[in-house]
Image (spheres, helix red, strand yellow):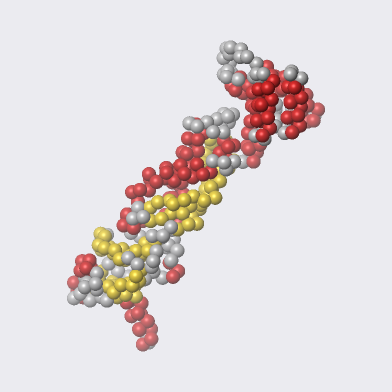
Amino acid sequence: MGLIDFVKGGVRELAIARPDDKKGLLVYKHPDPTIPNKAQLTVGTDEVALFFRDGQFVGQVGTGRHTLETTNIVFLNRLIDSFTGGGVFKAEVWFVTTREVAGFRFGGRIGDVEDPKTGLAIQTMVHGDYSLQITDPIQAIQFFGQRSFASDEEFTGWFRQLLLKTVRDRIASLLVHKQVPLLQVTSGALTEEIEREVLEGVKVHLDGYGIRIVRLGNLVVSIKEEDEQTLKAMYKDVAQIRLAGGLAGFQQLAAGKAVMAAGEGGGRGGDNPLLAGAGLGLGMAMAQLYGGQQPGASPAPTRAAASPEERLQRLKSLKEAGLIDDQEYAAKRAEILKDL
């Protein structure tokens, strides 16, 4: 080894800092537990340095450049290596990032969820990203198990599973307890509410680790395109059932659709899921259900028919909600106006 190499090696031993290529890690462990007396410790503005010995926390040093000697940092007295006569400290030094770190991604299936409007179980997925922050470095190191990570993959993998579980629970709450239609959840209209509830729900699991998820980003709850089309068609039929006044009106509506579908689809019943195969029977059951009557139950007491004015108002609401198109709106409106 030449003189220059020897000098460079000595400088490295005397300079304790996180290397530039490790700046992206949440935690970084200095590789050498033998630290010369009067070594220079450099701690970045967005991190703290923790000192451990034999697995026990000894002390921490904040932002700045520090000379490691006992007259300067008192807790170093507990780290003196007796075999060197005070010339060396024995310690594991951890650098822990304390700023908010963004760009972590999560996503996957959250399972079959039942749409409260149709009763169908639909495979639902979610993806997005999140940022996190270490709020208690000592607790966070205990979570990491005092290992030097080459990457954060193992750590963030655990977070992804935790987020998926929490998102699944919150969406189930919206569908089951609040009876929110699944298409409203996947539309993005409730993204802020879902994010808020997920952050609150995941907080319970992380408080003991000294870590928090600060915010979610680009959160998307989705279903397959074919499932979305099926739900839209069924929502539309449910709306028409209500507008038609229940089962009797739906039977007339279904008969008319069947005639049109036979002409358009060669008698196959078209692509409407309520008219294909056993779909008509499902439509009848839905008519009973949304008319306030369960399939197979005794007929419910007859209710007073809605006035033409009320029917026109409902029809307008359906069009504004996008459940019927302009042609259907015009045809139904003309039919109602005849009753005036």
Q: Splitting the image into 4 quarters, where does residue 324 fall?
A: top right
Location of the N terminus by quadrant is: bottom left
Q: Is residue 232 above or below residue 220?
A: above
| Rendered residue at 81%/27% (across/down) | 263
User: Is 336 on the left or on the right of 192, as rendered?
Assistant: right
Q: Is residue 303 above or below residue 99?
A: above
x%, y% of residue 259?
A: 78, 24
**Residue 277 visible, this orientation:** no
Total marks in image: 0
| Rendered residue at 32%/70% (across/down) | 32
Q: Is residue 91 above or below residue 242?
A: below
x%, y% of residue 154?
A: 43, 55
x%, y% of residue 131?
A: 46, 54
| Rendered residue at 65%/22% (across/down) | 310
User: Is 334 on the left or on the right of 117, as rendered?
Assistant: right
User: Is 297 on the left or on the right of 248, as rendered?
Assistant: left
Q: Nearer the viewer, residue 236 or 263?
A: 236
| Rendered residue at 25%/59% (across/down) | 56
Q: Splitting the image into 4 quarters, where does residue 290 fall?
A: top right
- Residue extending furthest bottom? 3
Q: Nearer the viewer, residue 71 or 95?
A: 71
x%, y% of residue 328?
A: 74, 30
**Residue 214 visible, this orientation:** yes
Location of the C terminus by quadrant is: top right
Q: Splitting the image into 4 quarters, where does residue 200 fall?
A: top left
Q: Is residue 236 above or below residue 338?
A: below
